[in-house]
Amino acid sequence: MLTMQEILETIKMVQEEHLDIRTITMGISIRDCAHTNPQIATQKIYDKITRLAQRLVPVGEELEREFGIPIVNKRISVSPIALVAEASETDDYYLFAETLEKAAAEVGVNFIGGFSALVHKGLTKGDRNLIDSIPHALAATERVCASVNVATSKAGINMEAVYRMGEIIKETARLTAERDGLGCAKLVVFANVPEDNPFMAGAFHGVGEPDCVINTGVSGPGVVKKAVVKASDCDLGTLAEIIKKTAFKITRMGELIGREAAARLNVPFGIVDVSLAPTPAIGDSVAEILEAMGLERCGAHGSTAALALLNDAVKKGGLMASSYVGGLSGAFIPVSEDGGMIRAVEAGALSLEKLEAMTCVCSVGLDMIAVPGDTPAETIAAIIADEAAIGVINHKTTAVRIIPAPGKKVGDYVEFGGLLGHAPVMPTSTFSSAHFVRRGGRIPAPLHSLKN
């Protein structure tokens, strides 16, 4: 039971500190929609999504009114399309992306994830078809999101897939050049991808999930920042405890909304993802939390340690509050979506190399990074390989969402608007990685993966 004090605290968090449910995401298995005829398969996919998700948006709006808590996004994730479309007698999977777009528009969600492939140990014909279809799919749709998992701690890193994704990102940017490469903002390359992540662009419905499930993503950087500021000059151990207790309250609210949504939709509740996901709104910044801890600017020496403290405390607070914490959970550090990160880049405090170091201890990886449009595909592939190595060695999820902005150079800006925000174009290394990434093959799994 929630106490009156907890209810009052939550109201204050919503009204003054930007607390919200970032997303209610319905996961839907479409594996039973596979068919040799792609027209039949896509019709079955459309029918199943629209049947199960027809009340998702209305229920979300009901909960907002009844509980007074903003639910920013209502979204859908589906089984990886590469697994389903492979049964169809076609090599062009754009038809499946078009179907996802139509279904998402029909039920009123803002994004649908699952135009995805899992290729950490190799690629099937369906995987190749899916990956080849990504640029066209993301350029011609508004709501469809794509992801590709290229590495796991058990399998190592599939460098053939890594190199190909460097080329795919470049092509996606080219096809959406008039929108500053916006298509790349809907594409994530993962290592150790979670199957129950409710956040876009990386959400898909994993093969170990039930037929239909509700997952929620909660975000509260503003709430945590307020708690850190209020804590003043306490020692870091005490600060970690304060953050942990704050995350506990946020998680309780997220699970309450998630379970209520699942009950009204008559589907199981899955997980609550307790991720500090920033937005361009003033005060809703992970970078500002780190600065409130005592850093002059995010990116200064000590930033990685501060982020490690923050990420760990958020995870511990979530686990104290719920037995069903999942997804990614922790702290996101996207540049374009975080006003504090943008200011840190502009001040010269935050570089791509420092961001990479910080991804060792945060929830995901290099997220919403804009780089010059003439950055070679091999360099992008090498950046993906670096992030994948961090994930594989440390048994954690890492990811890359990078935008080689067509026609833009260092110091220019990309403008996406809304939650995607805007970002300064950051420099990459001028030295080539081409020969390394073109070697192909698979970087073997680390020794400590052999735990059986």
Image: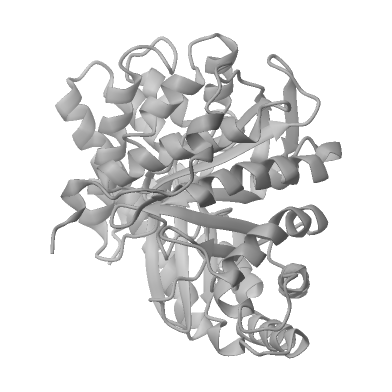
Residue 69 in sight from this viewpoint: no
Indicate the colouring scheme: one colour
User: Residue 109 placed where, x, y %?
Assistant: 68, 65
- Residue drawn at the location 38% of the way across and 23% of the way down: 290
Q: Quadrant of residue 385?
A: top left
- Residue drawn at the location 53% of the way across and 56% of the way down: 148
- Seen in the picture, residue 402 relative to 199 is either above or below; the reply is above
Q: How many marks?
A: 0
Q: Nearer the viewer, residue 244 or 369?
A: 369
Q: Nearer the viewer, residue 51 or 225?
A: 51
Q: Quadrant of the N terminus?
A: bottom left
- Seen in the picture, residue 109 relative to 247 is either above or below; the reply is below
- Residue drawn at the location 50% of the way across and 17% of the way down: 351
User: Residue 297 placed where, x, y %?
Assistant: 44, 13
Q: Nearer the viewer, residue 414 or 50?
A: 414
Residue 286 as seen in the image, left or right of residue 74:
left
User: Residue 27 placed where, x, y %?
Assistant: 52, 73
Q: Quadrant of residue 279?
A: top right
Q: Quadrant of the C terminus?
A: bottom left
Q: Nearer the viewer, residue 380 or 5?
A: 380
Residue that sits furthest to the right in the current view: 178
User: Residue 308 placed where, x, y %?
Assistant: 28, 32
